[in-house]
Image (spheres, rainbow, N blue to C red):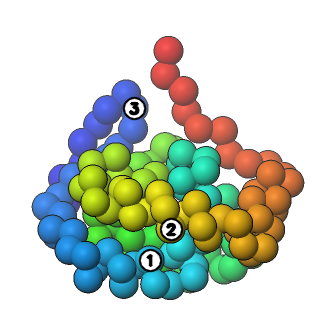
Amino acid sequence: MKPLAFYGLIIKTFLLPMLTPTLFFKCLGDDTRLRCLILLHQQGRLCVCELTEALDMLQPKISRHLALLRQSAILLDSREGQWVYYQINPSLPLWARQILDIAIQQAAQQPMPQQDRQRLHTMANRPEPLRCC
């Protein structure tokens, strides 16, 4: 892995696997990963601590799921100081983006994602992302 510096951010660059429909649907097939994706879709990007608070789960479990999504090229991560932020990969293939949008739209109406969003909004001491001029 070779780090790339961009506006003070460190972004890891490496060869990503080709996203196949099978891999994509396996990633969406887990409730924890889908809940992470719903929040990231709604918020743009979040750090691990925000996701652990919102999902009310331990950090190692969340990190394991985020690593799988990152390794599958569905998510990108970046480090800002002590925080690692995740966001949905804007370079997802069109077919994957369309499926993800539909799945998230439907799943977001369920009670659990609504509770996740509420816990995130009431989180104390949320990290402030670094801002460039």
Tag 2: residue type? Answer: Ala
Q: Secondary structure at mark 2?
A: helix
Tag 3: residue type? Answer: Gly
Which residue is disc 1 drawn over? 28
User: Please, which residue is most extreme toward the top here?
Assistant: 133
Q: Secondary structure at mark 1?
A: helix
Which callout, 3 or 1, points at the residue further toward the start of the chain? 3
Residue 18, placed above or below residue 83: below
Which callout, 2 or 1, points at the residue further toward the start of the chain? 1
Disc 2 versus disc 1: nearer the observer: 2
- Viewer-proximal residue among 121 and 79: 121
Which residue is disc 3 drawn over? 8
Q: Residue 53's spot in the image, x, y percent?
A: 73, 66
Which residue is disc 2 drawn over? 103
3D distance between C-alphas at marks 3 and 1: 32 Å
Q: Is residue 9 in view from this perspective?
A: yes
